[in-house]
């Protein structure tokens, strides 16, 4: 059975085998280039994120997929939902802007809070940090798709499952001709 | 010293149309390079490999550049890479549809002082058992074409083994008919 699976590969000549590797490479690169293209279009380093916690309920639930933009000339305003990074945390946070101070020269500092949290985010920020600034922002929420992100959450919770699925797909593409 | 080469027995799942087509294509290629003593020309397939390699290279370069110079700085390079990647993909699609057109072997032979190029292409319709082979011969001034349309069952026996002798016969027949046609005129 397993032998039959690799029969196709064994019979390939050098060029067919190289093409097989390259077409696998092209599947991966297409996904990568679409992602990079979205980055350029939206101006955000991570144009699509998944909500991981219930801190923004009832607006967003765990597993919602968010689309972000981050154009430099769009000002941040109170009431907007922003995604921001905090030093020392790997995962960005999605929360609403609660207070904002803007100077005449355009620099802003703002405070955020999760809709479902009882206190603001100062406790989540880095030690001694009281405000967020524009450089912390990953993007502003522009749209969302409910529940689609649950797949990513499950994948990240069960890494073995993730590697099994990805491995099977990779083997299938590499072994199967055309 | 000559070593008798035992012909390799190719066994496939004959219900898998793509696998059957690939196996017969391979067998036909062997007929051209073996029995008919032609020299295979790889220019066409090498062209496609180059395009693919270039596209993957562009994507890798974008990945590396974005890693070295994180996003806002790498913007210009990313725009160039993304545009050229999708441009290369469309070139590749055009290459396979208009240049390759399903040609799986290009073989050259010299008869007298005449250089001939043989191109074999094949296609199988979805959910169909008919293997369509088109053989084109070009030399200095003429282009000739012959085709055959036969069921997979003709080339593959009940066990899923390719019957090489039948393929050799079929190709030789086509080869001779095209070659002799030339002499008549």
Image: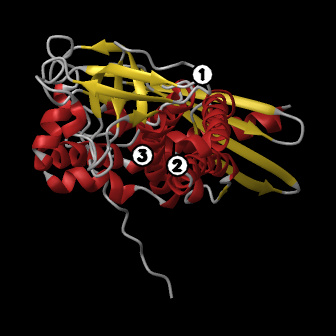
Mark 1 vs mark 3: give the one in front. 1
Left or right side of B72 for B154:
left
Can the viewer see residue A172? Answer: yes
The relative height of residue B37 versus residue B144 in the rendered view (above or below) is below
Which residue appears at 47% of the width and 38% of the height?
A135
**Chain ID, mark 3:** A
Distance between mark 2 and mark 1 Cα atoms: 20 Å
Q: Quadrant of the C terminus of chain B?
A: top right
Q: Give the labeled residue for mark 2.
A: B70
x, y percent for residue A109:
43, 30
Distance between mark 2 and mark 3 Cα atoms: 26 Å
Can the viewer see residue B168? Answer: no
Q: Are marks 2 and 3 in contact (CB under 8 Å)?
A: no
Element at label 3? helix
Element at label 2? loop
In the rendered image, residues at marks 2 and 3 fall on the same chain: no
x, y percent for residue B49:
60, 49
- Quarter of image, res B101: top right
Which residue appears at 32% of the width and 27% of the height?
A111
Which residue appears at 67% of the width and 46% of the height?
B44
Q: Give the mark nearer the N terminus: 1 vs 3.
A: 3
Q: Nearer the viewer, residue A55 or A39?
A: A55
x, y percent for residue B26:
46, 48
Q: Nearer the viewer, residue A47 or A72?
A: A72
Tag shown at residue A73: 1
**Chain ID, mark 1:** A
x, y percent for residue A151:
18, 29
Left or right side of B79 for B113:
right
Distance between mark 1 and mark 3 Cα atoms: 40 Å
Label 1 environment density (alpha carbons within 10 Å; few <14, some 14–19, many ≥20)? few
Q: Give the labeled residue for mark 3.
A: A24
């Amino acid at each position: 059975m397993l032998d039959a699976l690799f029969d196709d590969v064994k019979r390939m000549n050098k060029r067919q085998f190289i093409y097989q590797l390259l077409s696998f490479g092209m599947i991966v690169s297409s996904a990568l280039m679409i992602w990079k293209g979205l980055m350029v279009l939206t101006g955000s380093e991570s144009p699509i994120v998944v909500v991981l916690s219930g801190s923004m309920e009832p607006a967003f639930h765990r597993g919602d997929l968010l689309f972000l933009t981050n154009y430099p000339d769009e000002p941040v305003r109170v009431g907007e939902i922003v995604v921001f990074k905090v030093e020392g945390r790997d995962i960005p946070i999605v929360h609403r802007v609660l207070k904002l101070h803007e100077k005449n020269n355009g620099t802003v500092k703002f405070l955020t809070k999760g809709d479902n949290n009882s206190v603001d985010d100062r406790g989540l920020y880095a030690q001694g940090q009281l405000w967020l600034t524009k450089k912390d922002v990953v993007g502003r929420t522009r749209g969302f798709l409910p529940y689609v992100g649950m797949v990513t959450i499950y994948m990240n919770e069960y890494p073995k499952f993730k590697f099994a699925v990805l491995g099977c797909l990779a083997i299938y593409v590499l072994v199967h001709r055309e | 010293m000559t070593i008798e080469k035992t012909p390799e027995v190719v066994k496939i799942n004959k219900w898998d149309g793509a696998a059957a087509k690939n196996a017969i294509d391979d067998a036909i290629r062997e007929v051209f390079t073996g029995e008919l003593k032609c020299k295979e020309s790889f220019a066409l397939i090498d062209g496609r490999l180059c395009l693919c390699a270039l596209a993957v290279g562009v994507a890798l370069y974008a990945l590396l550049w974005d890693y070295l110079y994180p996003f806002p700085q790498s913007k210009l390079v990313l725009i160039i890479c993304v545009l050229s990647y999708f441009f290369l993909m469309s070139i590749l699609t055009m290459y396979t549809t208009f240049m390759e057109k399903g040609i799986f072997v290009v073989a050259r032979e010299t008869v007298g002082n005449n250089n001939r190029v043989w191109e074999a292409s094949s296609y199988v319709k979805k959910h169909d058992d008919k293997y369509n082979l088109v053989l084109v011969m070009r030399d200095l001034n003429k282009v000739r074409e012959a085709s055959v349309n036969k069921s997979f069952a003709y080339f593959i026996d009940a066990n899923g083994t390719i019957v090489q002798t039948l393929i050799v016969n079929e190709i030789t027949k086509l080869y001779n008919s095209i070659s002799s046609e030339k002499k008549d005129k």
